[in-house]
Amino acid sequence: MRYLAQVNQIDGVEQSMLRLLALQVTDTTWQVTEAKEKVVAAPESKGFSHRQLVLVDMDSDDAIKGIADATDWVLELVGNYLASGITPTFLKEEASRAEQWRQVLTLQTQDLSRRSLEVEARQEQLKNLDQRLQHGQQRLREQWKSLITHAETMGLDTAELVATMEAELAGDKDKDGDGEKSSD
C-alpha cells in the first residue's frame, strides 16, 4: 500500500514519526485516511525534514518498505491537473454535462426509434393499400372482360357499351366532385 505522509520529528528522538494523510486506492485514485492522526514510526527517515511530505510504501502488516520524497509527485499533480484547470468542481460539472448529453441522446434515440416504427407501419399500410388496389383493378378487368364477352354473345355493339359505361363513369365523377354521392 502507498500512503502520502508527513514527517514529524520529535526533539531529542532520533526516530521520526510519519503521519499518514492519504491512501492510494488505484493508480489514479487516492482516499484521505479516516484517522488523520494515524501515525507510524519511521526508522529510516533520516534525511527528511520536519513536516516534509513523503510517499510511503507499506506491506499488509503495516511495515514500511520504502520512503521517498513527494516533491516531484506533488509537482506532477500540479502540472497535470491544477495547471490545466482540472479541479474537482470542473470534473463534477463535466460529469453532469456528460450525463445531460447522455439523457438527451437517449431521448433522441427513443424518438428516432418511435419515428422509425411509425414509418414502417405507414409503409406496411401503403403496401396493403397498394395490394388491395391492384387486386381491385384485377377484379375490375376480369369483370370488364366478362361484360364484354357477355355483350358479344348477346350480339350487342361493344363500342356502344364502352361509350355508355364511360359516360356513366364521367357522370358519377362529376357528382362526386361536389362532395355529394350519386343516389342512382
Image (tube, rainbow, N blue to C red):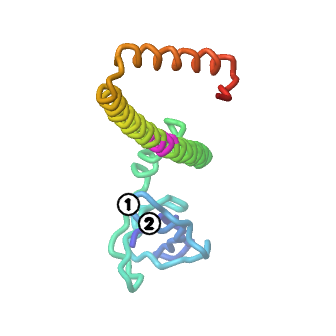
Report the front residue among 18 and 97.
97
Position of residue 184 measured from the top left corner of the image (x, y, whole percent): 64, 28
Q: Look at mark 1 in the image and give the residue it sits on.
A: 27
Which label is found at residue 110? none
Q: Residue at x 48, y 39 (%)?
A: 122
Which label is found at residue 24? 2
Q: Residues within 10 Å of mark 1 (few under 14, many from 20)?
A: few
Cβ–Cβ under 8 Å for marks 1 and 2: yes
Whether the magenta-drawn stretch holds residue 160 is answered as no
Q: Which residues are magenta?
A: 115-121
Q: Residue at x 56, y 66 (%)?
A: 32
Q: Is residue 12 left or right of residue 181?
A: left
Q: Main secondary structure of the magenta part?
A: helix
Q: Residues within 10 Å of mark 2 (few under 14, many from 20)?
A: some
Tell me the CA gap for discs 1 and 2.
7 Å
Q: Is residue 60 above or below residue 94?
A: below
Whether the magenta-drawn stretch holds residue 118 is answered as yes
Position of residue 174 measured from the top left corner of the image (x, y, whole percent): 61, 15
Q: Residue at x 52, y 66 (%)?
A: 31
The image quarter containing residue 8 is bottom right
The three-letter amino acid code for the residue at tag 2 is Gln
Q: Is residue 6 left or right of residue 89?
A: left
Q: Residue furthest bottom?
A: 61
The three-letter amino acid code for the residue at tag 1 is Asp
Q: Secondary structure at mark 2?
A: strand
Position of residue 38 measured from the top left corner of the image (x, y, whole percent): 56, 77
The image quarter containing residue 147 is top left
Q: Is residue 58 above or below residue 109?
A: below
